Image: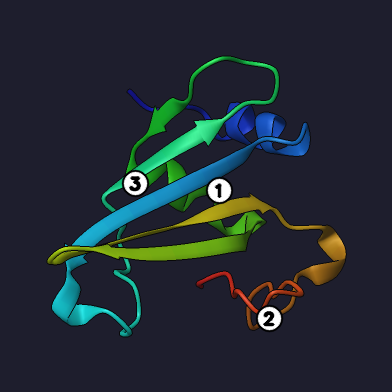
Amino acid sequence: MRISEQVLLSVLRNGGCIRSFWRRSARLAGTPPPVVPDGLVLETPGESGDTPLCHVDFAVVQKCLVCDETWTQTVGGTEFGGAVWCQVPDTQISSGGAVNEKGCQNEQ
């Protein structure tokens, strides 16, 4: 079920974030992460549980997000990873995408 852009932006403005996660063969460790993650969830401050998002929900608000944190971990033959996406302050938006102090760039 789709979540409206206004609802997503409201949660993000109030301190929420979107977490993405993926998995792949450990043979690919060290290469760029997949463009399309395996899953996305919306974390709402003060609420228990997360709201699953579809790729379309994320794509609609991605222009307003910046990657705040990334992680990877290899377990056996599988590499797992993910990212935390938060709303970007207006002052960080440029024609090349938004870049935060940790060097993550918002894809265009």
Tell me: residue 87, above or below residue 106. Answer: above
Q: What percent of the width, then of the height, locates residue 107?
A: 50, 72
| Residue 82 % position (x, y) | 42, 57
Q: Quadrant of residue 97?
A: bottom right
In the displayed orientation, state which residue is furthest to the right. 91
Quadrant in which residue 69 is drawn: bottom right
Quadrant in the picture for residue 54: top left
Secondary-structure class at tag 3 = helix
Q: Position of residue 6 (x, y in %)?
A: 63, 30
Q: Earlier in the sequence, mark 1 or mark 2?
A: 1
Secondary element under disc 1, as helix, strand or loop, is helix
SS class, disc 2: loop
Q: Horizontal placement of 70 versus 32: left or right?
A: right
Q: Amino acid at mark 1?
A: Val
Closer to the chain start, of discs 2 and 3, is 3
Structural distance between the alpha carbons of marks 1 and 3: 10 Å
The residue carrying pointer 2 sits among few (fewer than 14), some (14 to 19) or many (20 or more) residues within 10 Å by Cα, namely few
Residue at 39% x, 42% y is 40
Q: Nearer the viewer, mark 2 or mark 3?
A: 3
Report the side of 94 relative to 34 (left or right): right
Residue 61 - label: 1
- Residue in the image at 35% along x and 63% along y: 73
Mark 2 = which residue? 95
**Mark 2 to mark 3: distance in Å?**
23 Å
Mark 1 closeness class: few <14, some 14–19, many ≥20 residues within 10 Å:
some
Residue wearing tag 3? 55
Left or right placement of residue 76 versus residue 59 in this view: left
